[in-house]
Image (tube, coloured by chain):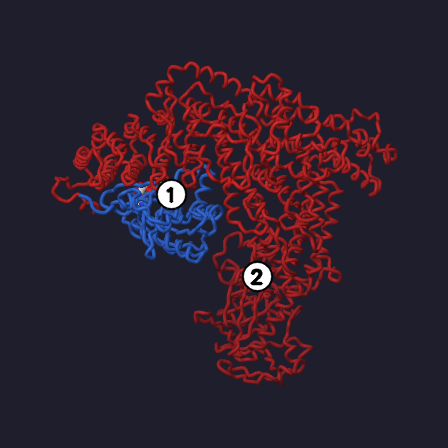
Amino acid sequence: MAYAYLFKYIIIGDTGVGKSCLLLQFTDKRFQPVHDLTIGVEFGARMITIDGKQIKLQIWDTAGQEAFRSITRSYYRGAAGALLVYDITRRETFNHLTTWLEDARQHSNSNMVIMLIGNKSDLESRREVKKEEGEAFAREHGLVFMETSAKTAANVEEAFINTAKEIYEKIQEGVFDINNEANGIKIGPQHSTAGAGGAGGAGAGGAPPGGCC
Amino acid sequence: MFRSRSWFGGGWGRPKNPHSLERLKYLHNILCKNTTVSESNRGILVESLRCIAEILIWGDQNDSSVFDFFLEKNMLSYFLRIMRQKCGGSSYVCVQLLQTLNILFENIRNETSLYYLLSNNHVNSIIVHKFDVSDEEVMAYYISFLKTLSLKLNNHTIHFFYNEHTKDFPLYTEAIKFFNHPETMVRIAVRTLTLNVYRVQDASMLRFIRDRTAAPYFSNLVWFIGKHILELNACVRNDADHQSQQKLDDLVAEHLDHLHYINDILCLNIPDLNDVLTEHLLHKLLIPLYIYSLTSESNKRPVTSSPYNRDHLQSIEVITRNLEAILTGKTTDTPSRINYPLQRIESDDETKPSVSCVVSLFLLSQVFLIITHGPIVHALAWIILQADLSVFEDGVSKILDMYVSNAKSSVKLEFSKPQLSLEKALENTSCPDRDYTTPEYSGAKAFGYDTDQSSCDLDPELVSTSLPSTSHISESSSIAHDSTEDLVTQIQQVKADSSMTLSKANMPDSPLPDSGIESSSSKVSERNNITDEEKQKLLGKKPGTNTERAAIVEKVLEKETKNIETRPFLKTIFDSLDCSENDYKALFALCLLYALINNKGVNPELLDTLLYSELDDGAKPNTLSSKVNASEDETGSTTSQERSSNDGNDKSESFNALLISKLMAIAVLSCKPASKVRLVTCELSVRLLRTCMQGSKGAVSSRHISSVDNLRTRSAALARNFYKCDDIFLDMFEDEYCEMSKRPINVEWLCMDAAILLPPTRTPMSGIAFEKRLPSGEMERARRAIRTFFLIRELYLKLTGKPETQLPLANPAPFVQVADILDLNDSDLISCDIIQKDGTWQHRFLAVDNIQVILVEPDKQRLGWGVAKLVGSLQDLEIQGDKDDPRCLHLTIHKPRVGASAALPRTMLLRAKFKFDDHIRSMAAKQRLTKGRTKSRQKKMQQIGRLLEVSGVAAPAPAARHRPLFARPALSSVRKHSGIDGDDMERRIRRPSGHVLKDGIVVYRERTTSRESSISRTSSAHTSREGSPRARSEDIPLEDIRRNPGIAAAVPSTSSIGRVQQTIPSTSQHPNLKSTSSEETSFISKEPRPKRKGIVETI
Ligand SMILES: Nc1nc2c(ncn2[C@@H]2O[C@H](COP(=O)(O)OP(=O)(O)OP(=O)(O)O)[C@@H](O)[C@H]2O)c(=O)[nH]1
Ligand SMILES: [Mg+2]
């Protein structure tokens, strides 16, 4: 349970681009390619290691709240990282990126790391948005870019972890004010509370709890 | 594939297929065998719970028997049993349980399955389970679970969560206990949930929300907003040095979040809820804290003499108190309504919390920018604009009566801690004899603001965050409800009645403000030094001379200045507009006025206070011109007969003239070299000036126009101070224009910026944008002057309705465009290789026009003609020699500024090394380009000079025109077909067929049909050649080089290097260098190109 840092992420993008699936794929790897199952969640947490440090990622999906302006704006502010997702098989989801980005830039703190994700890369045959277009958009707006598939898990780990790495670097550079929890970063408890929670594993959201039976 | 396969080992007879009914049965078996959670079976339980979620979702989509089995075995009860165990309650297991539930509820598509899941109340039991919310992870999963459920709410599912009979709504009541949780994400989830609940619009449920929870929830909400604000205030007060900007940012953002949240609730338009919320906001926060703070500072200042400040010592404080009394009303049992306020005045003195005037203006601006709910903003606007001394002193009883009879005001006007913590209050939701819409606030301890105590600390009494939940949503307590059901209904009945009247009173056009206006203004006008009749006279007279006119304005101003003393809040705002020391407060006062005027919820008539001009009212008859003389010096006492004609206009006192004079003062100050007015303040006051001068009628009087014209002259004079033939001035000028057009002020964004809350600073190192601080250094002072000039010029043009014709600085049209075909016969061309950074290179010819540098490629179809490959602006050209190779120049070429794009920042087209045939050509090119650049810049500087009325630049230079175009057959130039769209094509065709560039370059647009082009080809070639007198209006020949023998001598003549083989420059061929204009620098490249008659000059 003890972590050096906790980073809060949000996932944004049009409906149906696969936000919830990406979230679950990352935190739980449940999205099985063999069975055509659609499972997603709107919250998840998982522990990762960067630079030998335990870092907990908390990911909050923002879906379904777009109707309320107050909600979106506060979500942005509370996050250290954002995954901006579009669906490579639906061009309109790509076209809406500018609006999402404007919103994010306007409401988030200026240090928030934004990662652009073109999801559903497994559906190559139905592709409507070229990879180069995603790259160009990312370059133009200073984002990191990656194509992922929540279905095959391709690049999903990388997307979340690279974002974390960038946040981590920013912390090292002293850009992020880590003492301000409103930025979406929390410093872990100084002493690892050994007894707390008993199992010491990463909980359901984390890596699979070690050993049983 | 399934990652966790290994966990179950082999032998337990586990079905192979992870997605099957058998597998679920197997998992059920595991649950049955492990009813007691222990260290040893925890792992397997967690994994089983994970699998169950997956199988259920699979079943939901593929096999209904799976779900049937789950329901049949009542498997949710296992979940409950597990989490209720001590060990099972460990975060490890709980988190998995919650996640399984999350997955379940989020992914189930089959409605029937969902209903079954919800039907047996297990979910409610899970909701009220006392999870260990001190565990961060449990808390996060728990609140996500609640939020997920709230997203499933609709008119059907609501009944699974809200029990109409027992008046139980655990999903909502449990969630709102965390409304002030320290974790942002948790707070956001709670807000989301509440909004999701409200929007279901189930009447019974909403009634429950209003009667049982609204008062405690909203009073706590409002209380915490207030605490935040006090913290913000402390932060501003203690931070003159901009040390805690980050914290301030957060506090400001937090306040905005709150306002947006409240606005989101109000926008759902649920009357019952809005009434309660409005009441709490107004009475517990906006009036007692925000509005009250508007007075507290002027209170400390010595009050200026005014007939209405007889007892000014008590004035402002008393006013607020009385206002409070008026708006408060009181509980119905209080015997004497009118005495009530007096008692209140005595009671709590020093304890009243308040914030600084700056903070209060800032916060009120935000309120008016965000909230549009009529009853709130209208009431606030009314208080700010109309609340009037006379009302406080004499008119109380009348207003009070009216207000009290309408309002159910159960809430005392005071920023005080809710007496009941939300937790406690909610606990009591199950006791129907208590009524939370009328809590006994009267005895509430006033909140004493203690500087030492960090007010952001959560008040343990009030918030439940870390406390285990104490609400008892159990069967036993709900039984208790039933016995008193009747009483509840009765109470609700009463309430429904009273709330109906309240909602009427809250309408934007409620009787309250209007009657207030009437009673107050009639009183004021009677006391006025200038009587209505006299005003009438003043207005009626035809202004014969300027001085007479000025005298009238003077009088009206004088009157308004006196009258404003009776409007304590408006006076504070007006006083804040004074920028003689600095514009710290003024900026916020401007924001507030702007926000107030532009708020849709404010009744437009109320705005007459600011926008209605008594002076320029066209409706006034000018019948009284004869009385002009009489009124001159007896302003104080005139009484006259023409009363009747005037009565109709006496609806409200206007302060339009006073406001305009204050705004003008800011603008005038902005035009002073050492002014302390920031650009943002200037821009905003200019914006407001426009609104106020246009007034409620939209017509601008000539008086205003002439004063703004005057202002424009001042601003031009200010900018003129910096007008130098300094290279940078032109760039600054154009850059500022483009900045201004790109980013007109956005007040909403401005008010999100916490940085402006700190005293104005000068240094750019503060990280504050240029507009929001004072200029630092000469450069920035110049920029500020230029920008001020633009702002005021724009105001002038807008008021007069004139179009802008001189900005952005225009370039003489027409232009050469890329792909144009140019007749380059007999033109100065310099051959060069363009070497890009990446090593690629192209061969081009360099030509120079008045304002452009053009790179051409020979036209393969016609000798002597070339195709423009790149066209850049001479003005922005950057030229640099190469240290190592004298044949080379480094050029940075930007896009020409044409038409609309002239207001955009310049874009770079090319940055590359240009290699010429030899150092002489290189030098020639450099000279030519440098001169061209200088000339094109000089032209623009002349334009600026005319704009700024710099003496000596007054006359528009006719020379800017090109030499007359000689007649050419219209079709002569048509060339290649290119895919130009229709519009563009037409435009091009209509243009004159060609124009002459410097040095005889003739431009022909591409035509679009090949037929045309074939015609043209035959006819054009010679006409253009023969008919062209050399057009050399602004040429920059190479005389300079020649004239300067020093340079010439210094340059070694290494002529025929490399590709330059065919032409060897020879001086001898120049008979009359100066008189003829036939010199060319047409260096010829390797390409076989017939040498033209051109004389290549040597240096
Ligand atoms: N082929 C394929 N399908 C995917 C992938 N990711 C998601 N999907 C499918 O896309 C659909 C939408 O996925 P969700 O995760 O619910 O989308 P969302 O962005 O959360 O949508 P909202 O919650 O409505 O905003 C589901 O049917 C998924 O099965 C992917 O990588 N590949
Ligand atoms: Mg989703």
Alpha carbon distance from label 1 to label 2: 48 Å
Nearest the viewer among B842 and B903 is B903
Residue type at numbered disc 2: Pro
Q: Which of the labelled discs sits on residue A60, or is there none?
A: 1
Q: Under 8 Å from ligand 1: the CB of mark 2?
A: no
Instruction: Locate residue A209 relative to residue B822 in the image: left or right.
Output: left
Using a 10 Å C-alpha cutoff, classify the residue at mark 1 as few (fewer than 14 neighbours), some (14 to 19) or many (20 or more): many
Quarter of the picture containing the C terminus of chain B is bottom right
Which chain is the one coloured blue? A
Residue type at numbered disc 1: Trp
Q: Give the x, y percent position of residue B488.
A: 44, 17
Name the residue that disc number 2 marks. B896
Q: Exactly how many numbered labels are in the figure?
A: 2
Nearest the viewer among B638 and B648 is B638
Secondary structure under the numbered disc 1 in the rendered image: strand
Secondary structure under the numbered disc 2 in the rendered image: loop
Q: Give the x, y percent position of residue A128.
A: 36, 49
Q: Chain of mark 2?
A: B
Q: Are marks 1 and 2 on the same chain?
A: no
Q: Give the x, y percent position of residue B460.
A: 44, 35
Q: Does the rendering let one see residue B763? A: yes
Ligand 1: image quarter: top left
Q: Chain B hue?
A: red
Nearest the viewer among B522 and B508 is B522
Q: Residue at x 61, y 53 (%)?
A: B761
Q: Nearer the viewer, mark 1 or mark 2?
A: 1
